[in-house]
Image (cartoon, rainbow, N blue to C red):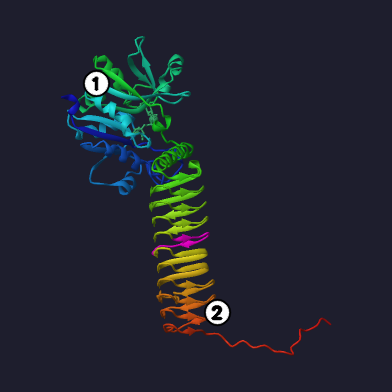
Amino acid sequence: MVSAAPLSIVILAAGQGTRMRSTLPKVLHPVAGRPMLAHVLDTARSLSPHGIYVVHGHGGEQVREALDAEDLAWVEQAEQLGTGHALMQALPAIPDDHRVLVLCGDVPLVRSPTLAPLIEQGGIGLALLTITLDDPTGYGRIVRDAAGQVQRVVEQKDATDAEKAIREINTGVLCATAARFRRWMGATGNDNAQGEYYLTDAIALAVAEDLPVITAETRDPMEVQGINNRQHLALVERACQRRLADALMTEGVTLMDPARLDVRGTLACGADTVIDVGCVFEGEVTVGSGVSVGAHCVIRDARLADGVTVEPHSIIDGAEIAADCNVGPFARIRPGTRLDAGARVGNFVETKNAQVGPGSKINHLAYVGDAEVGRDVNIGAGTITCNYDGANKHKTVIGDGAFIGSDTQLVAPVKVGRGATIGAGSTIVADAPDNQLTLSRSRQTSIPDWERPKKD
Ligand code: UD1
Ligand code: CA
């Protein structure tokens, strides 16, 4: 049965991308935090193909380095002689009976359900994805006969005025067997306005062979939006963000404004989590249920358990926040931080490589780095772990139930015992014993008959 033939996917990605005006190859420009080509690869992989071929040109080494994987074959198109020529570079490796689905590396939002009917029909004849646009300028137009049958595709630069009026366009996505593509591309010349080998010549050739040419149409223009400049990139970025926002809302997340959310990587959230405006999630972020993230937070590579509250303007990076913790506003949680259940880290507090035990509080203006803080510890405002001696980092250990008075410097390596109390304003350079008051502070004196100087 024809439709059971194996599927090979060819991704055309050799275009120069000059209009991006960038030193970065176009297909590596990120959409939602990942190279645009990575999105196309995701979609390709979701179709479980036999093989994926990426046709690269300019900057190929860099692209390959960024996205290399065992299931990809890289094909070089040394000179960009057109889409037909690009496909031809990949065809020698693909067996005759395979269906070949052609995708573009700079069209990242195409979805697999849209591609399914093309793959289905691609074994029988030629299947192509089209869309009807209000402004079709620049695209190849779908020319149909009086009966509505596709006759050919004419490129903008080769089109007559009547053809330019056609609003149904070729998206660049098409599918047929390798044997047929091989035959058609062999018969294609470059005698056209651009002097290129057009992949779109395949359509007229299929019609000439009386093969069925079927079209599938998408209604979502963003699905077939190509990226040729930074304006397109911004457009696709927004559309992608909107999709991610929709998916989160479907999972039971409240977004105060889905248009003001940025996910640059992956964000998984439990139900009844509420995310206020202007938050940026980067890398891999997992958020539990019933979490509240205040406005304008940046959360990167972090795990937040159920019931966590993050107040506005906080930054959480490389950290693990256990259930019911309270973070911020204006907190900076740096890599290696672990906050245990119910811990609180307040405004203008920076933590780094610090384990903070359950129920402990660091509520204001503190730096806690390279530290192990026990349970139910209270760290007063202005406390600093002096972890760096200019050459090496040292550890501070604070026992359960300790109370660190405000404006204390803990000069590491140093240990504060369980239940210990440190007097405010102390500079602690040696271990403080369990359950005792330790302070280092000059004695307070008052001079009873002292008078303020008077102005002459
Ligand atoms: C092509 C189609 C056009 C369609 C449009 C949709 C042809 C002749 N025309 O236009 O009908 O409306 O896509 O966007 O196919 N590429 C290569 N090597 C090359 C040339 C292109 O790999 O030598 C790649 C590009 O990187 C890109 C894709 O092919 O991913 C499409 O190329 P692009 O120049 O954007 O499209 P057009 O040729 O203008
Ligand atoms: Ca072109």
- Callout 1: few (<14), some (14-19), or many (20+) C-alpha neighbours within 10 Å? some
Q: Is residue 262 above or below residue 355?
A: above
Say if the magenta span includes residue 93. Answer: no
Tally of marks: 2
Residue type at the position of mark 1? Gly
Task: Identify whether 149 is placed above or below 221.
Answer: above
- Residue found 26% across the figure and 14% down from its top: 208
Mark 2 residue's CB less than 8 Å from ligand 1: no
Tag 1 residue: 125
Quadrant of ligand 2: it is top left
To which quarter of the image does residue 419 belong? bottom left
Q: Nearer the viewer, residue 188 or 123?
A: 123
Residue 455: percent from left, percent from top = 82, 81
Amino acid type at circle 2 is Gly
Instruction: Say what secondary structure mark 2 lies in.
Output: loop
- Say whether residue 96 is left or right of residue 300: left
Return the x and y of residue 7 as percentages of the image width and height. Answer: 22, 32
Camera sees residue 396? no
Q: Nearer the viewer, residue 232 or 386?
A: 386
Circles 2 and 1, Cβ within 8 Å, touching? The answer is no
* Residue matched to label 2: 425
Q: Looking at the image, which residue is at 31% across and 46% down?
A: 67
Give the quarter of the figure containing the C terminus.
bottom right
SS category of the residue bearing label 1: loop
The Cα–Cα distance between marks 2 and 1, rounded to whole angstroms, is 82 Å
Residue at 45 percent across and 72 percent down: it is: 377
In terms of sequence position, does the residue under pointer 2 or pointer 1 come before the other?
A: 1
Q: Is residue 43 above or below residue 421?
A: above
Q: Which residues are magenta?
A: 325-336
Q: Residues within 10 Å of mark 2 (few under 14, many from 20)?
A: some
